[in-house]
Amino acid sequence: MRGVNADSQGTRDMPAGTVAGRLAVPAGLLAAVVGAFAYVGAVDPNEPGHYPVCPLLRLTGIYCPGCGGLRSAHAFVHGDLVTALHDNAAAVLGYLGFAVLWTVWVVRAVRGRPLRIDLGPVHLWTLGVSLLVFAVVRNLPFGGWLHP
């Protein structure tokens, strides 16, 4: 392959450019996430009227996998990990997963390699089933400790 660098795994190097240019998109995404967390940290979702109520919870009384996510983010921002896990454990895993993925993305961008995420059907099904099990368990009597 002339003009294209490939590593041993068959991925291609990113086009030549400055490190700052390669970090523009990850930095922009991080700025958006930090802004969202700052807003949720400043505007308490535990006080009524600031955010809309989950429509599924309002109509059926059933907690969806996202119920308590804003309260979890608020507690997480304030360093209260126990409350964040109580409000929505799946969301906390998502925050931590995002942090790991973003860090890998930045390291690869600095090295001039693209971030490639190959989620196959097994990964997607596992994620979907995990969220479904989380939603079902938190709505059963013995899963009350998962209620937000």
Image (spheres, helix red, strand yellow):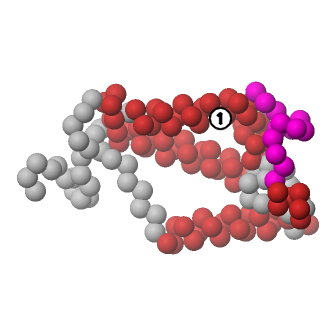
Residue at image coords 77%, 36%: 75
Residue 104: give x, y in percent of width and height: 43, 43
Report whether residue 143 is seen.
no
Which sits in the foreground, 20 or 90? 20
Which sits in the foreground, 58 or 120? 58
Which sits in the foreground, 49 or 10? 49
Q: Is residue 4 found left or right of 43 in the rendered image?
A: left
Residue at image coords 48%, 33%: 28
Residue 17: give x, y in percent of width and height: 24, 33
State which region is magenta.
Answer: 42-54
| Residue 47, quarter of picture | top right
The prevailing secondary structure element of the residues shown in magenta is: loop
Q: Is residue 23 found left or right of 79 in the rendered image?
A: left
In this figure, which residue is indicated by the disc labeled 1? 36
Specify the amino acid type for callout 1.
Answer: Ala
Q: Is residue 104 found left or right of 80 in the rendered image?
A: left
Magenta-span inclusion, residue 97: no
Residue 138: give x, y in percent of width and height: 82, 62
> Is residue 103 placed above or below 134 in the rendered structure?
above
Give SS at disc 1: helix
